[in-house]
Structures are given as C-alpha cells and as structure tokens.
C-alpha cells in the first residue's frame, strides 16, 4: 500500500488523509449550520416569500414554475434534472476534486480553496438568512423530496444562496481549464447552465438564489486566484 501510494498519489497517503479530514470537517460544519437554520422556520418561510415577491415584481411571473411544468411532462428530462440535483453537489464535486487531486494536482489547491470558501460563505448565509425553497412555499411547485433520506441529509432552508449554482460554476471553470479533450471542455462549459436549470426545474431554487450563488462563486474565485490577495495571506502566514 505504501508503494502504491508513492506511485499513484501526488503527495502520499498522509496528504490524502489531510484532504479527507478537511472535507469531513466541512461536512460537520454543514450539519451544525443546518441545525441552526432549522430553529427558525418562520423566518425561512418569510425570506422565501420575499424572494417570490421580488421576482414577481421584477418579471411578473415565476419562470421556475414554468421550468418545472415543462420538465414534469417529459419523463426522461424529469429523470435527468432530478439526477443532476441530487448528484451535482456531492457526487460530481467529490469526483471532480478527486480527479484534479490525482491527475491535475498543480490546480488542486486553488480548486479546493475556491469550493471551500464558496461553501463557507453559503453557510454563513444559511445561518443568518435561512430561506425556504420554492417547493415548500405553496406557490404552485410540486414537492418531490419528502422521504426520510432527504430529511436526514438535506438542509430544508438552504435556498439562498444556491451552492449548487456556485459549485457548478467553479467546477465548470476549473475543469474547462484543466481538461485537454475538446468534448470534455464542451461538457464542462455547459455544465453550470445545466445545473442552474435543474435546480430551478426541481423546485429547489429560484433564479435569484442562482444569481446569488454565482456571485458567491465569483467572489470566492477572485479571493483565491487574485495574486495580490494571495501575497497578503502568504505574508501573514510567514
């Protein structure tokens, strides 16, 4: 096992263990934030209704409801968007991080830090501005997520900002840059837009949530990849 680690792991088993500890540590923080948000459902529903009021005032309709009605009439498309919602945030993120760690290690630190920073910003939002998703607000959406696994693993009041939207954008940008085959670049170029559509069509996010998530991703990547900011943090560590 030691020899295999030296052959296939960029920095050995010890570094892989550190990276896993970072991700599992974040999972604990997520559950803590979820527990805090769960304590004030009335505030979450009020914030969700505020999003509804804002969107209907700006666009005079809920386009997300149109997306869901369109998808619900097409079984294959409905399956695809549901799969995307459930897998884009954990399965795809996890596999993307693992791929970059093993095969494009020079890009790993920036990628990891962007994901973690975006998610930390999102957790702060969930604690201070819990927001119910469209499917729970009683404004016409079908709530298809009612089983016990959902109740155990998901934060029901984590709509604003959309971390699905944030992580999809970060993954799309980074993997577009590190992948070499044209078909892979094309796939990751459209991945963020597909995820944004999927989370709206499943009734889990409004477009305003996605816009906020995109802003979070841009902020996180700006902080992580800005050379001046990196020099300041490096000087403080020194």
Image: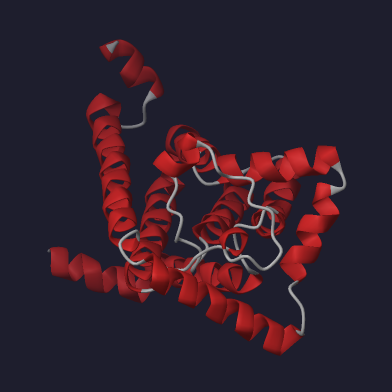
Is 78 placed left or right of 236 in the picture? right
Which of 193/50 is in front?
Answer: 50
Quarter residue 146 falls in: top right
The answer to whether residue 167 shows anywhere in this view is yes
Residue at image coords 56%, 69%:
209
Q: In the rendered view, tell whether residue 25 sits above or below residue 124.
A: above
Residue at image coords 57%, 60%:
136
Q: Quadrant of the N terminus?
A: top left
Which of 60/101 is in front?
Answer: 60
Q: How has the structure been colored for display?
A: secondary structure
Which of 123/104 is in front?
Answer: 123
Image coordinates of residue 54 in percent, x first then y, are 62, 85
Quarter residue 17 falls in: top left
| Number of numbered discs visible in the structure rendering | 0
Image coordinates of residue 221 in percent, x first then y, are 46, 66
Q: Quadrant of the C terminus?
A: bottom left
Image coordinates of residue 90 in percent, x first then y, are 49, 41
Image coordinates of residue 121 in percent, x first then y, are 37, 67
Q: In the rendered view, tell whether residue 224 sits above or below residue 178.
A: below
The answer to whether residue 183 shows anywhere in this view is no
């Amino acid at each position: 096992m030691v020899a295999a680690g030296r052959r296939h792991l960029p920095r050995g088993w010890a570094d892989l263990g550190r990276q896993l500890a970072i991700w599992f540590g974040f999972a604990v923080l997520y559950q803590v934030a979820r527990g805090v948000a769960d304590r004030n459902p009335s505030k979450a529903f009020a914030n969700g209704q505020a999003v509804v009021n804002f969107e209907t005032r700006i666009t005079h309709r809920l386009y997300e409801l149109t997306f869901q009605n369109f998808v619900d009439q097409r079984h294959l498309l409905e399956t695809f968007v549901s799969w995307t919602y459930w897998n884009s945030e954990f399965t795809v993120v996890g596999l993307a991080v693992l791929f970059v760690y093993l095969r494009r290690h020079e890009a790993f630190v920036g990628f990891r830090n962007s994901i973690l920073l975006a998610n930390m910003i999102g957790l702060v939002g969930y604690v201070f501005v819990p927001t119910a998703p469209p499917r729970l607000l009683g404004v016409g959406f079908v709530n298809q997520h009612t089983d016990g696994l959902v109740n155990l693993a998901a934060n029901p009041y984590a709509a604003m900002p959309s971390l699905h939207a944030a992580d999809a954008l970060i993954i799309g940008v980074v993997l577009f840059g590190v992948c070499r085959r044209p078909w892979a670049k094309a796939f990751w170029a459209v991945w963020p837009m597909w995820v944004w559509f999927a989370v709206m069509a499943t009734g889990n996010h409004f477009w305003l949530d996605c816009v906020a998530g995109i802003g979070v991703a841009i902020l996180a990547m700006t902080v992580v990849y800005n050379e001046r900011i990196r020099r300041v943090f490096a000087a403080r560590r020194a």
